[in-house]
Image (cartoon, helix red, strand yellow):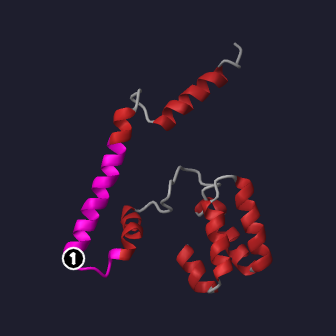
Amino acid sequence: MAQNIKKDYRRKDVNLLFKQAWKAYPKSEFKEAMLEMMKVKRVAFKELMNVGPERFSHAYSPVRRYRLMTSSIAESMNSCLVHVHQMPITTMINFIRDMLQKWFYKRRTKAEKSQTQLTPWATELIKQRNIDSKKYTT
């Protein structure tokens, strides 16, 4: 979507506001960026709202997207490799290998430090739900 916004409107301010909106986690920051976009380029604002914030924003995403905004693994990999597409194939393969090794090392290291068998996110979710459940009565 960012590429379409950049191509369709060819304005740095619109592109910057779009990035602020999709990267914002608090809904208040998302709304602030989108209101500013409405002032700057109403057509872009309407187009994005027609698409739906849940399709492009972190704040309204129904799932945890981290830094990837696609459900296709091929698109995800392409977005990580965009700057190496013009390199020789051996250089590209080495880059991909290094990138994947770093990802796996980072995740393994984090997992080894974990005190539970669940991810930190799942552990926190269960802890919060346990706290919430103490408020219920039978």
Query: From the viewer's perspective, is 26 left or right of 82?
Result: right
Label 1 sits on a secondary structure element that is: helix
- Is residue 79 inside the magenta stretch? no
Amino acid carrying mark 1 in the image? Ile
- The picture places residue 8, in percent across and down from the top left corner, at 60, 85
Q: Quadrant of the C terminus?
A: top right
**Residue drawn 74% across and 73% down?**
37
Residue lying farthest right? 39
- The picture places residue 62, in percent across and down from the top left corner, at 59, 51
**Residue drawn 38% across and 70% down?**
78
Front one among 22 and 86:
86
- Relative to 47, say whether 29 is above or below: above
The residue segment tinted magenta is: 84-108
Q: Quadrant of the N terminus?
A: bottom right
Q: Quadrant of residue 73?
A: bottom left
Q: Which residue is mark 1?
A: 89
